[in-house]
Image (spheres, rainbow, N blue to C red):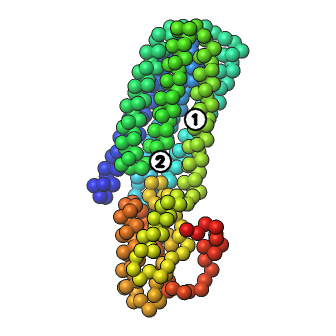
Amino acid sequence: MSWKQDKIKRYKKAAVTASVLTAVILFVIKTIAALMTGSIAVLSSLVDSLADIFSSLISYIAVKFSIKPASCTHRYGYLKAEALSALVQAAFIAGSGLFVFYSGIERLINPEPLKQTGVGILVMLLSLMLSILLILFQKFVIKHTDSMAVKADSAHYTVDILTNTATLCSLLVVQWLKIELTDVVTAFFIALYLIYYAFDIAKQAVSYLMDKELSTEIRKNVAEIIKHTHHIKGFHDLRTRDLGGVYYFEFHLEMDGNLMLSEAHHLSDLIEKKIKARYPKAQVLIHQEPFGLKEKRLDDTLKDCNI
């Protein structure tokens, strides 16, 4: 294992460990605040933190699994475990959002006055500070690892900042203006946001699992690398996908049919090195063939998708 790969693994483990610890701390202090204040907004933030604990644990397991090296049964590695974890997290977050929404409706039917809002305000301020510190660390890790599990986890805590801020504002309004309906409205806002964000995370995870093509920009970059390599007559059937932070490129390379095998290999190797220089963690599979060969091509089937 290279020192760079070892550093990536250590960063990922540190990020998910910090996430689990932060989620547990937030859950404990919000539980105390919810019991003392009776606030439905604080309860919704508490449920969000419970979802974070579950999500962080799932991320921790997924990261430990995804960093395993390729094996005889999984020769592409286990990187897609992170996408699976994001899908599970999305389902749990959506369920949490629905629970908060139900609790808000119940509070509208049976209203209750809030108590000790000052305690709730202090707890939400502390929660806000902890979430911001964790996100700053997660952004640092994402920059160096491009981990999907850490990205999904960071997304939860980004939502936490919004929910904690909204809850804090609602408590301030209740304490100063005595408008207790604000508490329920804030809970509804948090619930809807949780459901929306769960859908967004699930959408991204499904794209990874279904081998969605990489962006047009990345495909064009690869095409330009191939076109500007001497002695290459053309290429076709470029297929790309994200293996979970590792880009995979596959294409047919057209060359002079009279080239020696060693020369054809040298050209293919040159293009592979250029692509990996642009995308360091990429995997590249090149099929070499003589220029002008008549055959059935994927590009002919997908005419509207050609670069």
69, above or below 95, in the image? below
Task: Pinpoint residue 27: horizontal percent, then vertical percent.
Answer: 47, 25
Tell me the quadrant of the picture where the N terminus can be found. bottom left
55, above or below 38, in the image? below
Q: Identify the residue at image location x=39%, y=89%.
A: 260
Q: Amino acid at mark 1?
A: Ile
Q: Secondary structure at mark 1?
A: helix
Q: Identify the residue at image location x=51%, y=32%.
A: 159
Q: CA distance from mark 2 to mark 1?
A: 17 Å
Task: Pinpoint residue 131: horizontal percent, then vertical percent.
Answer: 42, 29
Q: Which residue is mark 2?
A: 148
Q: Which class describes the residues within 10 Å of circle 2: few (<14), some (14-19), or many (20+)?
A: many
Q: Which class describes the residues within 10 Å of circle 1: few (<14), some (14-19), or many (20+)?
A: many
Q: Amino acid at mark 2?
A: Met
Residue 53 horizontal side relative to residue 11, left or right: right
Residue 93 - label: 1
Task: Pinpoint residue 195: horizontal percent, then vertical percent.
Answer: 62, 35
Closest to the observer: 159 or 221? 221
Q: Secondary structure at mark 2?
A: helix
Q: Residue furthest right?
A: 109
Residue 109 horizontal side relative to residue 9, left or right: right
Tell me the quadrant of the picture where the C terminus can be found. bottom right
